[in-house]
Amino acid sequence: MDPGQLTFAALVAGSLSRWRAALAVTVATILIALVLSLVLPPTYRTETSFVTTDAGIQLPQGLADLATEPGLSGIATQMGIGTSKDPSVSPAFYAQLLDSRELLTRIVRSRFPDPRTPRDSGTLVEIFRIRSKDPDRAVETAVRKLRRAIWVTFDPKTNLVVLRIDARWPELSADIANRVVSLVSAFNKEQRFSRARAKREFLESRGAEAQAELRGAEDSLQLFYERNRLWETSPALIVAERRRRRQAETANTLYLTLRQQYESARIDEVNNTPVITVVDRAVPPKRRQWPRRGLILATAAILGVGLGLLWVAARELASHWARNNPEQVDLLRGAAGRVFREVASALPRGNDKGATRNVSS
């Protein structure tokens, strides 16, 4: 065997002989992790969930395709079964809504009790201590920070939306989560109210037109009866009477349909039934989400042992190489010494500055 070759047994033996260095590296890693766990600000996570409401019934994929066939779509509509859900009530829509800039901006500009001084309140820009001369820039920064603290998951089968908020203080985390849900509910009411109002206004104007058309058809039929007392004896007058009566019946059906839809729109406009149902309201958590000192210390201990072993193994390899290559070691030391002296000579010295001041004075 080559006497200059380092065997695995020799490497292990040399590394074990440096166990104090490995222990020092391990302890130093654990101490650094402990300091970081004490210095890092805590993070508390609050969870809230709500269920979206859908008036229609979602069919399975096969039945949904079958319901679109001619002759079956009308039956499905009469039974109150829709082939697809309204996108604005799907849980995926709420997931996108919770991540929208408009909603996050409203939350950032809302006022919350300041955890540092419970008697005072402030916006999230003030609580996050975002300093900027431009208010819009500060709000944008707060929105980005809040977006990183929000986690949204949803189940399309149960329409359950789960919202998680991370914050430095447990009370603030719960307040933000509850405010988000309240803003979502307010958005739903506003959206539904605007839709119902637009629909009511359209049906109101269209109903007035249909009523005028019905009156015109009824007046035409009345005039026909007044001018043609014996219309039943004439085939031409019978056809004309049927035509006018059919026009009056059609206008009456249209008017009644629009009137029913108008009354339904008026009910929807004043309907205060919530579109979302809160399952779990957010409460301040008692245990912080991060940092977890036990997990950090256990990970640091494992990492410290690995770094310690690598350190002593590297030192053993370097020592073995230095013993077998003394000339190269001297060459490296000489080069390092020259570099050190050149760097030291290039740096300004305090004594030279003092001497220059004395000479100038």
Image (cartoon, rainbow, N blue to C red):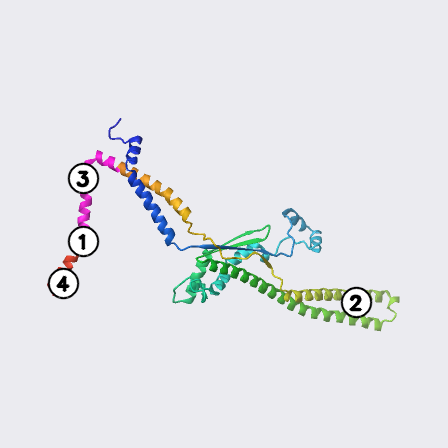
- Mark 1 to mark 3 CA distance (whole Å): 24 Å
Q: Along the horizontal axis of the image, is 235 left or right of 146?
A: right
Which residue lies at the image location 14% right of the left edge and 63% below the top edge? 357
Camera-nearest label, 3 or 4: 4
- Mark 1 to mark 2 CA distance (whole Å): 110 Å
Nearer-N-terminus badge (3/2): 2
- State yes or no: residue 331 in magenta: yes
Element carrying mark 3: helix
Q: Which residue is mark 3?
A: 330
Which residue lies at the image location 61% right of the left edge and 65% below the top edge? 193
Residue 327: image quadrant is top left
* Camera-side residue of 299 and 352: 299
Element carrying mark 1: helix
Element carrying mark 2: helix
For label 2, the crowd category at 10 Å Cα-Cα, with few meaning under 14, some 14 to 19 and many 20 or more, is some
Q: Which residue is mark 1?
A: 346
- State yes or no: residue 264 in magenta: no
Q: Can you name the residue that lies furthest to the top here? A: 1
